Amino acid sequence: MDQYSLLREFADSWFLLFMFTFFLGVVVWVFRPGASRYQNEAAEIPFRHEEKPACDDATAAFANDVKEARQ
């Protein structure tokens, strides 16, 4: 049996079963009872800094440089 036929047979049978099992595992993991807390936290990410936008250190340093240049 040549290599192509062997790999094709493996992909059609065992690898398909492995991928289906992996898919079911991911679905079960996402919809488990304890996952709702993490999903709610992820859903709130766009609204974390409604009053004042978050800035990282590079943005803060740039704002300080601009403020010093104006004075």
Image (cartoon, rainbow, N blue to C red):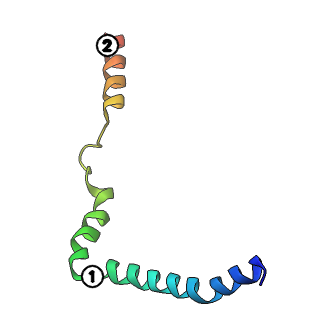
Q: Residue 32 carries which label?
A: 1
Vertical comparison of 60 with 3: above or below:
above
| In-image side of 46 versus 11 (left or right) | left
| In-image side of 21 versus 15 (left or right) | left
Is the Cβ of the residue at disc 1 closer than 8 Å to that at disc 2?
Answer: no
Rendered-image quadrant of the C terminus = top left
| Circle 2 crowding by C-alpha within 10 Å: few under 14, some 14–19, many from 20 | few
Total marks shown come to 2
Q: Which of 60 and 16 is in front in this view?
A: 16
Q: Where is residue 53 in the image (x, y as percent from the top left)?
A: 29, 43
Q: Position of residue 48 (x, y in %)?
A: 25, 54
Rendered-image quadrant of the N terminus = bottom right
Which residue corresponds to mark 2? 68
Q: Which of 71 and 63 is in front in this view?
A: 63
- Residue under the image location 33 percent in, 79 percent down: 29
Vertical comparison of 48 with 22: above or below:
above
Vertical comparison of 60 with 43: above or below:
above
